[in-house]
Amino acid sequence: MMSNIRSKGTRPEKMVASYLRQNGIRVRHNCGTVLGKPDIALIGKKRALFIDGDFWHGYGFGEWKDRLPPGYWEQKIRRNIERDRQVDRLLQSSGWKVMRVWEHDLEKHFQESIAGILAFLTS
């Protein structure tokens, strides 16, 4: 059932938040005061981290979009992709640094992904 799909508190998000907490990095989660509600934000440093689900944010969309039923889903994913781009542009124009990490990268290459996240958040 679609209502069971989380928009926050996902497994990849929890993995990152837990690692950061264990390493003494305090961040805001699903920060509603920042455009786009980043999954993780450092307000003072103007850093926004988005952990994007592969399906919802369209990873490799061009390769699998034809398998979706016509109409709703293709439009929804396209709107999500465009919204992500617009949020990135608006945040960057406001002086924010933005990083997006794919769900599959965290699950398959956690150490490399978290190293990049740490570098981003602490730079």
Image: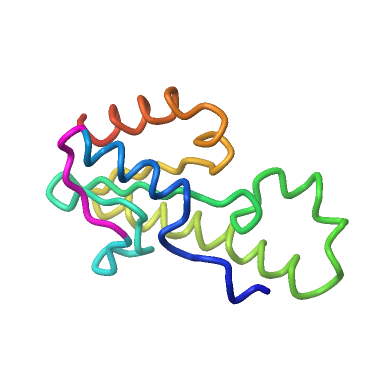
Please identify the quarter of the rendering in which residue 66 is found.
Answer: bottom right
The image position of residue 37, as x and y in percent, is 35, 63
Task: Report the magenta stretch's main SS.
Answer: loop
Residue drawn at point x = 66 percent, y = 62 percent: 77
Residue 67 versus residue 63 in the image, above or below:
below
Residue drawn at point x = 22 percent, y = 41 percent: 21
Which quadrant would the C terminus be assigned to in this image? top left
Residue drawn at point x = 57 percent, y = 60 percent: 82
Horizontal relation, residue 34 to residue 67: left or right: left
Which quadrant would the N terminus be assigned to in this image? bottom right
Tell which residue pokes out farthest to the left in this image: 44
Residue drawn at point x = 28 percent, y = 27 percent: 119
Horizontal relation, residue 101 to residue 80: left or right: left
The image position of residue 92, as x and y in percent, is 33, 49
Residue 114 versus residue 60 in the image, above or below:
above
* Magenta stretch, residue numbers: 23-29
